[in-house]
Structures are given as structure tokens and as C-alpha cells.
């Protein structure tokens, strides 16, 4: 719809407000009276300079302008927010896309513009902007796993358009991604149970779609120490009303990496077809992704319990596993559709299939029993594995009113089937070495084939109702999901069934958003649960040997406030997450196991994004957490600090469009974490770390074509540090990246 704003008002963000200084501008004006008003207003300075003043009040009156506002549909990608680095909203599971100010959760949606400008190659590169996220694999490893709010999110738990099990295995290519959305905290109610639980949060990918204006961009790029690559992005729409759209992305890179002796090769191609009619909208996405490496792989570091201290972090370029190689390949097809029967009722459905194959030395590249001098023992195991996944969902979305109360009700069913197969090398090879001066270890053979080892079926039904009243100043969401987890394990050699698991759980969720002072401030609260598969007692001495527990329910309680200042937004959140664990009690010779163990993380988060003033953008925040082992086996470590839970984490980035060179933008980002423990006994502690990243880009025209040159240097001072903890149960440290240089040139035609 179009809305005409009368003189004396301006349209800031999502709401019409009086033209006055924002609270930030007022604070800056009080602190520095000499700063010009035009540098603080989030609208063009020419308006303020050229607008007439009201002679009676002295106030500046703006000319009449017309603003076009569009509603946010459940599946259309929200528009970019001021500054272009994040979007105005994100997908909230079955509720579809929601504006940031309307959601009772802390969410951030990173845009393709940010991905391109930071030259992000993987999800880890994008999530390096988030203060609540840290990584549980060393930089450059074949897999990327994460820790959000102190809890693990496995690389298997990445969703595409809200559906799990369909994202590429290993590193997720970003060329086809329009949004990387991060919902912090467990969300089984809204997304269903992820394959590995994903209790720390949800990462959702939104594929690119063809825009109304045709696009075609080609790029060449370089990454240290010798990776050369190219990528292509082409999109077109067709039909009388641009109903049909096609978006194709391709990428190829090959060459030496920052790990001495290692080379990597990557191939990726995707195609996205979409249709948008008056009642029917549909999409079909397909991709092929393959990444291979040879000559070595990054390591992780398992420290000896007898170590008197943790040795200094080695140079990340040192190759502990020379001669290792591997390949990961994913192929997928994903279809979605939504049909709107009328303005109040619509149906949606999605179906996808992904085949994933891996071979080589992908897992287990750990330096084991590292002592204080850096000596370690190593075990090398080659693997061949596969994962075939089929994921589907269907549901109805209805809207109606009961008096002055508006309802949006969603009924959804999900079904995901996963078949796994794996075969490790037998026998494995062992060796001894040193993390600072490694040998070249002996390489075992990789199996020629693999057999089925497990089948998993995750099914659920959910019902959610969001009510709003008082002119949408209050929104309350309540829902419930019944989740069933069914697993069958097989002997890879004989094919015999070795174990069965069939459990279900009901998870509720509640969320509240209130805007007592208008649309610029949201107060919110939520209670949600996450689900992960319950464990089985395998200790033969246990009194309850063989018992299998129901799915673990992780609980989150959160309250927060969001402030949209028109051109930048802030979120302040206070949260508590508790996760059950299996623990033993009784006697060590004859223990009894229960699911009564607990890990608890309490924290405060501050997130910010947007434009502080014209040409100056900010992105990041700070997180303070207290992670505690509240209930442990035999009470041995009750009250100890949780593994991998630093008290402080911070990521803050800035961009500045220089005024003296049109098209030149300078950027910087600082990442930091304080000390953290690697073991439950709190004997092994890694020091805090900090990393500085710098960047520049220059946008210009050559021969009438838009050209962008980009340069990024990460870890400018080449700091060597242990970045985090790999596991809650074993003292394994991950290694941060060394200094890296990335450069690219892109041209649009």
C-alpha cells in the first residue's frame, strides 16, 4: 500500500514518527554539542538542509513524501534493513517470516550482501559476526560444527527453508544463499527436532531467487596461500507478470590452502526455479556440491590428563596429518509450494531429498594425549560413509478474529527419514609425533564400500496459535508439538539389528511480545524446549543396563527488549538454558544411570546492527554467560564451570564509506573470547583470545559495467590461539585460523 506522509513527519523503519532526533542522536548531541544534526539523522542530509523552518516553533518541516510499504508474507524473504548487512526479519519455523520486532526471540538474518562483501566462503565466516556463536571444529576442517549460547549445533542440523537434513554436508557453499538466519536457543516447537538435536539454536538457509531486474555477475577470487576460484550468478524472470524465475549459481576453486602441503578443490552448481502467481507460489531448488582435499588436514588437540599445563598453541599452518585426503559430495532436490485459498486460509508443503557421500580421512584427526611439551600420539582411520535423507512437511495456515482479537493458527506435520552407512579402516595406524615438529604418519587404506548402519525416522505434529490485540501492541504465541524418534541400528558386516529406539515427547512453547510505547520498542519473553535423542545405558555393571531414556528436553527461559532507532536496532536478552544429561549415582562398582544430570547456561546478550549515521554501519555485540555443571555423575563436579563456556564473548564490526573517494568502503571487525575450560574437573584451561580483521572494497564502473574490487585480511596480527572446546566430554581444543588474505573482482553485466 502507499501512504502519504504529511509535512513535519518522516517514515523511520516500520513506523511513522515525529521528525526529531533519535535517542542516540540526542545522547551524542549532549556529549558533543558541536556535531552537526545532518550527520546524525537517518535520512538524506539534503532534506534537513533544504527544508524550510517553521517560524513559530523553529522546527524543521520536511517536504511531503510518499512511502510504499509491503506486508511480510510467510515465505517471502524479508527486505534488507538499513545498511544492508542484515534483514528486517527471519523465518520463525512454521510461523514463516516474521519481523524482528514482532518475534519473542533473539534472531539475526545475515544477507547475501554481507556474504559478498566479507568474501565469506563458509557458514563459519558468516557466523563470525555473531557474539553468541563459537566453533567446535578447527578452522579449515572438513566439517563445521558450532556452539550457540554454550550448546552444540551439529553441521547436520542446518536447515534450508525450515527443513532439516537437506543442506550440503561438510562446508555449506554460500553462493546460492540469500540469507543465513540464526535463531538463538532451542526451537523444537517451531522447527521440529533436528537430526542431532540443535539445542543451542537453529541456523536456516534461504536460497536465492530471481529478482524482477535481471542480474548476471561473474567473479574471480584468490585466497591464501594459493586458492584461485571463480563463480557466476545469473537470474532472470519470465512471463507476462514475471511469474517465473530462474536463478543459477556456480563456483569452482582449486589450489593450496593455509595448511602446509594441503590442496583443496571445490565444485558447486545450483539452480532455483520459482513461480509466484496470485494464489499459488512454488519453488524447486537443486544443487551439486563436491569438496576434496589432499596432502593433509587441520587437527584438533586432545590433552593428556597428566599434562602440567597446556602447551602454547601451534602455528595453524603446521600439518600434523600429511598425506591424508578426502572427498565429500552432496546432491539434493527441494520443492516447496503454498496455495492461498483466500486471504484467511492457505496450505503449504515441502519435500526434499539429499544424498551425501564421504570418503577418506574426514573424522578423528586428533592429536591425542598431548603433553606439556607438545608430544602426542595419533590414530589415523580412513572412512567411507553415506547419508540419504528425505525430509517433508505439510500444513495449513489460517487467520480469523474473535472479537477484537486476531488469530493466526498453523497446523503442521513433518516427516524425516535418514539412512546412514559407514565403514572404518581396519586395522588403524598409530604413531607418535609433536605438534610443533610433526612427522609424516603412515596412511592406511580407505574401505572400498560401506553398508547400512542405522535408520532414523523423525516425525511430528504441531499446532500453534498467535493472537494479537490492542492494535497489535500485544502478541502472544502458544503451541505444542508431539515429536517421535525412531532409530534402528545395524551390524555393518552381517546386517543384523543391534539396537532399536522408539520414543516420543511433547514440547510446548510460549512467546510474548508487547509494544507499550509504540512500534519502536518491543518487550518480549519466551519459554521453549529443545529435543535430543535420549541415551542408552551401555555399562554392563549398571543396575539398569540396557535402559533407554526418552528424548532429552532442553528448556529455555528468556526475556528481552528490542529497540529500533530507525536506522539501527539493538536487542538485549537475558536467558537461561538447562539441558539434561545421563549420569551415574550409587556406587562405582554397581552404578545406576538416570537422565537426571544437568548443564545450565545463564547469560546476557547484546546484539546490534544497522547504520549509526550515513555511511557508517555496525554489526555484532557482546555476550556474558555463566555455564555451570549443576548435576554430575556421583556429584563429583557439581558447581564446576561448564566446558567450553567463556564468561565473555564479543564480536563487533564496522564499515565506513569514505567521503573523499566515492565507492571506497573500509571495514574492521574484532572477535574476542575470555578463558574457558576443556574438562569437567576444571583442570585444563585455555587462555582468552582476540582477533582483528580488516577489509576494503571499491565499487566503480568500467566500460559501463558495475565492478567491485574487494580485499580482506583476517587475523591481521597472525595470532596463534586455541579457539574453543570440541566436546563436553573429552578435553579437546580447537585451533583458530592464522592470518589469511582474500581478494576478488566481480563484474555485473
Image (tube, rainbow, N blue to C red):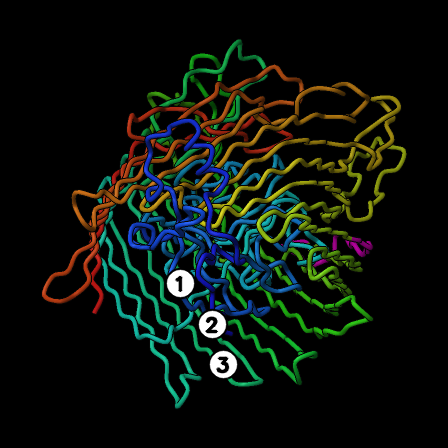
Instruction: Mark 1 and mark 2 in contact? Answer it, CB < 8 Å.
Output: yes
Q: Quadrant of residue 580?
A: top right
In the rendered image, the vertical position of residue 153 relative to residue 673, given as above or below: below
In the rendered image, the vertical position of residue 247 relative to residue 651, given as above or below: below
Q: How far, Cα to Cα, is label 1 from label 3?
A: 19 Å
SS assignment at label 3: strand
Q: Residue under label 3, please give it.
A: 276
Query: Can residue 742 be seen by looking at this rendering?
Result: no
Q: How far, Cα to Cα, is label 3 from label 2?
A: 15 Å
Q: Position of residue 285 (x, y in %)?
A: 47, 72
Q: Position of residue 220 (x, y in %)?
A: 21, 56
Query: Could you say which disc has been placed on residue 204 in the image?
Result: none
Q: Farthest residue toward the left?
A: 703
> Callout 3 environment at 10 Å: few (<14), some (14 to 19), or many (20+)?
some
Query: Could you say which disc has been placed on residue 176 in the image?
Result: 1
Q: Residue under label 2, please give it.
A: 285
Q: How far, Cα to Cα, is label 1 from label 2?
A: 10 Å
Amino acid at each position: 500500500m502507499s501512504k502519504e506522509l504529511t509535512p513535519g513527519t518522516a517514515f523511520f523503519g516500520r513506523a511513522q514518527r515525529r521528525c526529531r532526533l533519535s535517542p542516540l542522536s540526542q545522547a551524542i548531541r549532549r556529549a558533543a554539542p558541536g556535531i552537526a544534526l545532518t550527520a546524525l539523522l537517518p535520512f538524506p542530509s539534503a532534506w534537513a538542509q533544504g527544508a524550510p523552518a517553521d517560524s513559530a516553533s523553529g522546527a524543521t518541516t520536511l517536504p511531503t513524501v510518499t512511502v510504499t510499504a509491503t506486508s511480510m508474507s510467510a515465505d517471502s524473504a524479508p527486505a534488507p534493513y538499513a545498511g544492508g548487512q542484515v534483514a528486517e526479519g527471519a523465518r520463525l519455523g512454521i510461523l514463516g517470516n516474521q519481523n524482528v520486532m514482532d518475534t519473542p526471540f533473539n534472531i539475526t538474518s545475515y544477507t547475501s550482501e554481507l556474504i559478498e562483501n566479507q568474501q565469506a566462503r563458509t557458514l563459519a565466516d558468516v557466523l563470525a559476526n555473531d557474539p553468541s556463536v563459537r566453533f567446535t571444529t578447527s578452522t579449515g576442517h572438513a566439517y563445521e560444527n558450532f556452539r550457540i549460547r554454550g550448546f552444540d549445533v551439529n553441521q547436520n542440523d542446518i536447515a534450508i527453508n525450515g527443513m532439516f537434513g537437506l543442506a550440503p554436508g561438510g562446508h555449506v557453499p554460500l553462493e546460492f544463499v540469500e540469507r543465513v538466519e540464526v535463531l538463538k536457543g532451542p526451537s523444537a516447537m517451531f522447527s521440529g527436532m533436528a537430526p542431532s538435536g540443535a539445542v543451542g539454536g537453529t541456523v536456516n538457509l534461504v536460497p536465492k531467487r530471481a529478482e524482477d531486474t535481471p542480474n548476471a555477475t561473474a567473479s574471480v577470487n584468490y585466497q591464501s596461500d594459493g586458492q584461485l576460484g571463480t563463480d557466476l550468478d545469473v537470474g532472470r524472470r519470465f512471463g507476462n507478470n514475471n511469474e517465473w524465475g530462474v536463478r543459477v549459481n556456480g563456483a569452482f576453486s582449486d589450489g593450496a590452502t593455509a595448511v602446509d602441503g594441503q590442496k583443496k578443490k571445490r565444485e558447486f552448481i545450483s539452480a532455483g526455479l520459482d513461480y509466484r502467481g496470485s494464489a499459488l507460489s512454488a519453488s524447486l531448488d537443486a544443487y551439486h556440491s563436491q569438496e576434496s582435499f589432499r596432502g593433509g588436514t587441520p587437527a584438533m588437540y586432545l590433552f593428556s590428563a597428566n599434562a602440567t599445563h597446556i602447551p602454547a598453541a601451534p602455528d595453524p599452518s603446521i600439518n600434523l596429518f600429511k598425506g591424508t585426503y578426502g572427498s565429500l559430495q552432496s546432491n539434493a532436490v527441494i520443492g516447496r509450494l503454498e496455495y492461498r485459498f483466500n486471504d484467511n486460509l492457505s496450505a503449504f508443503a515441502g519435500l526434499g531429498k539429499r544424498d551425501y557421500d564421504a570418503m577418506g580421512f574426514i573424522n578423528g584427526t586428533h592429536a591425542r594425549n598431548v603433553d606439556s611439551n607438545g608430544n602426542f600420539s595419533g590414530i589415523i582411520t580412513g572412512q567411507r560413509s553415506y547419508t540419504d535423507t528425505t525430509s517433508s512437511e505439510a500444513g495449513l495456515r489460517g487467520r480469523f478474529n474473535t472479537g477484537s482479537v486476531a488469530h493466526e493458527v498453523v497446523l503442521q506435520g513433518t516427516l524425516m527419514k535418514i539412512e546412514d552407512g559407514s565403514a572404518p579402516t581396519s586395522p588403524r595406524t598409530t604413531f607418535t609425533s609433536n605438534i610443533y615438529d610433526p612427522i609424516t604418519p603412515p596412511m592406511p587404506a580407505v574401505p572400498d564400500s560401506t553398508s547400512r548402519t542405522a535408520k532414523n525416522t523423525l516425525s511430528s505434529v504441531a499446532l500453534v496459535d498467535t493472537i494479537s490485540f490492542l492494535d497489535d501492541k500485544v502478541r502472544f504465541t502458544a503451541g505444542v508439538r508431539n515429536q517421535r524418534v525412531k532409530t534402528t541400528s545395524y551390524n555393518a558386516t552381517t546386517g543384523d539389528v543391534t539396537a532399536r529406539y522408539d520414543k516420543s515427547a511433547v514440547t510446548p512453547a510460549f512467546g510474548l511480545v508487547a509494544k507499550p510505547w509504540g512500534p519502536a520498542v518491543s518487550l518480549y519473553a519466551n519459554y521453549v524446549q529443545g529435543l535430543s535423542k535420549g541415551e542408552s545405558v551401555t555399562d554392563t555393571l549398571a543396575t539398569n543396563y540396557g535402559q533407554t531414556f526418552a528424548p532429552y528436553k532442553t528448556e529455555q527461559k528468556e526475556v528481552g527488549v528490542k529497540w529500533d532507532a530507525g536506522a539501527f536496532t539493538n536487542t538485549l536478552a537475558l536467558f537461561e538454558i538447562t539441558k539434561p544429561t545421563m549420569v551415574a549415582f550409587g556406587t562405582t562398582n554397581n552404578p545406576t544411570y538416570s537422565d537426571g544430570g544437568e548443564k545450565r547456561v545463564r547469560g546476557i546478550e547484546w546484539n546490534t546492527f544497522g547504520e549509526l549515521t550515513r555511511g557508517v554501519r555496525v554489526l555484532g555485540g557482546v555476550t556474558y554467560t555463566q555455564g555451570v555443571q549443576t548435576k554430575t555423575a556421583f556429584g563429583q563436579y557439581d558447581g564446576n564451570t561448564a566446558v567450553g563456556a567463556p564468561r565473555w564473548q564479543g564480536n563487533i564490526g564496522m564499515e565506513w564509506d569514505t567521503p573523499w573517494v566515492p565507492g571506497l568502503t573500509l571495514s574492521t571487525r574484532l572477535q574476542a573470547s575470555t578463558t574457558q575450560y576443556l574438562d569437567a574437573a576444571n583442570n585444563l584451561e585455555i587462555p582468552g583470545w582476540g582477533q582483528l580483521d580488516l577489509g576494503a572494497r571499491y565499487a566503480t564502473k568500467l566500460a559501463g559495467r558495475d565492478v567491485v574490487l574487494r580485499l580482506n585480511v583476517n587475523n591481521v596480527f597472525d595470532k596463534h590461539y586455541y579457539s574453543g572446546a570440541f566436546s563436553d566430554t573429552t578435553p579437546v581444543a580447537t585451533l583458530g585460523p592464522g592470518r589469511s588474505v582474500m581478494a576478488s573482482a566481480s563484474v555485473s553485466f
